[in-house]
Image (tube, rainbow, N blue to C red):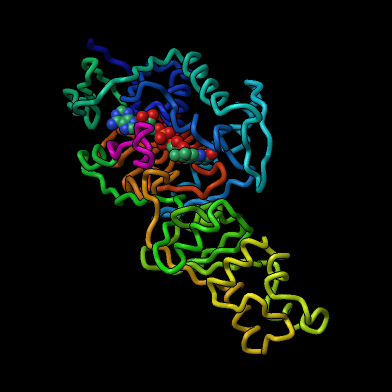
Amino acid sequence: MQSHSQVLVIGAGAAGLMCAAMAGQQGLSVRVVDHANKAGKKILMSGGGRCNFTNYYIEPNRYLSRNPHFCKSALSRYTQWDFIGLVDRYGVAWHEKKDGQLFCDNKASDILNMLLDECTAGSVDISLETAIESVSFIHKENGGDRGVFILETSKGRFSADSLVIATGGPSIPTLGATGFGYQLARQFGLNVFDPVAALVPFTITDHLSGLCKTLSGNSCRVRVTCDKQSFLDDMLFTHRGMSGPAMLQISSYWQPGQTLTIDLLPELDVAEELRRLQHQSPKQLLRTWLGQQLTQKFAECWLTQMEWPADITLAALNGEQMDRLGAQLNQWQVKPSGTEGYRTAEVALGGVDTDELSSRTMEAKKQPGLYFIGEVIDVTGHLGGFNFQWAWSSAYAASGHL
Ligand code: FDA
């Protein structure tokens, strides 16, 4: 097979489908190529199967990047309201879960089907199960910077005037994720920041590993701080460490070797409260009090771990002990041994250096006609629909320039 189109998009994921649909609807001939046997696998897995497709509160400060300004232009030109408008036109039922996070009422496939219908409306050709063997660029005679991109694939040769790379990041390889976009960027001389797993659970192998195992499945609301960043959300103990939204969020800021400060009772100054209660209910057991704040199981396991006597009453605590307990509960120091890595990470930090791209069009400055969109770029959102919004916004930015 041999075919030429005006636009070739590599990657039939969130950004690739969105960009292809918009370009196709502008009248351009568009082909999407993906090695997976199904389009949009991450969309289907996302948000626990309900796809957290955007957030009411999209702000540039919810994104990590070497250049925090890069995302501003695209996010402001295709906003969460634009995507909500699209979802509403398709009659997809949705709801706000919490903190502005918008989810489908039914299934994530509602979003994927919407994108595929948009592609059909733009007469986009989608070639799945197509392995890319090589990508090259041939200058047009008298074409200046312009030329033709040629893809040699398992299904033949595809060529195009513009090439859009929407291959995402390397997290969850079983869903077809690869570092192909980085490799391609390097082939065209662009700088790439090495990817690092983010929005990922922590592993704990030190003296706290037994506690994590025992409390596995238990969760509580905490404030976790690392590297001057804080998140107030749920923490979940797992067999191998700690997870839950608070931990996933902070993992994007954590560096190996750093310690997390976890406030287990973020609404309470523990030392102050214990001093107050010592007068009010002196006979109350410390573990009963802590069990009322958290859960009884949590209180017992945690106090044993911290070597507090099982039957100590509030009256028996001296000032130094109350301060120590206060510090242990309000500023629990936890040093993860690592993260679960790309096997379970939702995204990857790093990617194509934003200095190499136009923030208005996502086109590579060194290679006209070559575009990068979505997660492959060094722009990573917080948990909560921010990453999909980046996929939609960056796709829109590129589509208007193809
Ligand atoms: P995406 O990964 O969607 O698509 C890349 C495509 O490129 C894939 O189809 C892949 O097969 C293809 N590809 C890769 N290498 C290739 C190669 N060599 N040749 C051909 N094709 C290739 N975000 C959010 O905002 N809300 C949420 O609810 C969730 N939930 C969530 C759950 C889970 C389990 C994960 C792993 C991730 C999320 N995310 C999320 C993150 C979100 O899924 C992610 O940021 C976007 O899918 C990124 O969109 P892209 O289009 O850039 O890549």
Question: Does residue 225 show up?
Answer: yes
What residue appears at the point 60 percent right and 55 percent down from the top-left corner?
219
Which image quadrant: the N terminus? top left
- Asked where in the image residue 114 lies, by quadrant, the reply is top right
- Asked where in the image residue 185 lies, by quadrant, the reply is top left
Question: Does residue 389 show up?
Answer: no
- In depth, the one of 293 and 308 nearer the eye is 308
Location of residue 203 with respect to 364 vertically, above or below: below
Q: How many marks?
A: 0
Q: Position of residue 216 (x, y in %)?
A: 53, 54
What residue appears at the point 42 percent right and 53 percent down from the top-left corner?
65
Q: Is residue 173 magenta?
A: yes
Name the outermost residue toward the front: 311
Q: Position of residue 116 (x, y in %)?
A: 49, 19
- In depth, the one of 168 and 325 nearer the eye is 325
What residue appears at the point 70 percent right and 86 percent down from the top-left corner?
316
Q: Position of residue 266 (x, y in %)?
A: 65, 67
Q: Main secondary structure of the magenta part?
A: loop
Task: Give left or right: position of 138 versus 3.
Answer: left
What residue appears at the point 22 percent right and 30 percent down from the top-left corner?
144
Location of residue 41 with respect to 260 vertically, above or below: above
Location of residue 24 with respect to 241 vertically, above or below: above
Task: Give left or right: position of 28 versus 370.
Answer: right
In terms of image quarters, where does ligand 1 lie? top left
Name the outermost residue toward the top: 1
- In depth, the one of 157 and 172 nearer the eye is 172
Q: Is residue 298 magenta?
A: no
Boundaries of the magenta span: 165-181
Task: Give left or right: position of 190 versus 336.
Answer: left
Name the outermost residue toward the bottom: 319
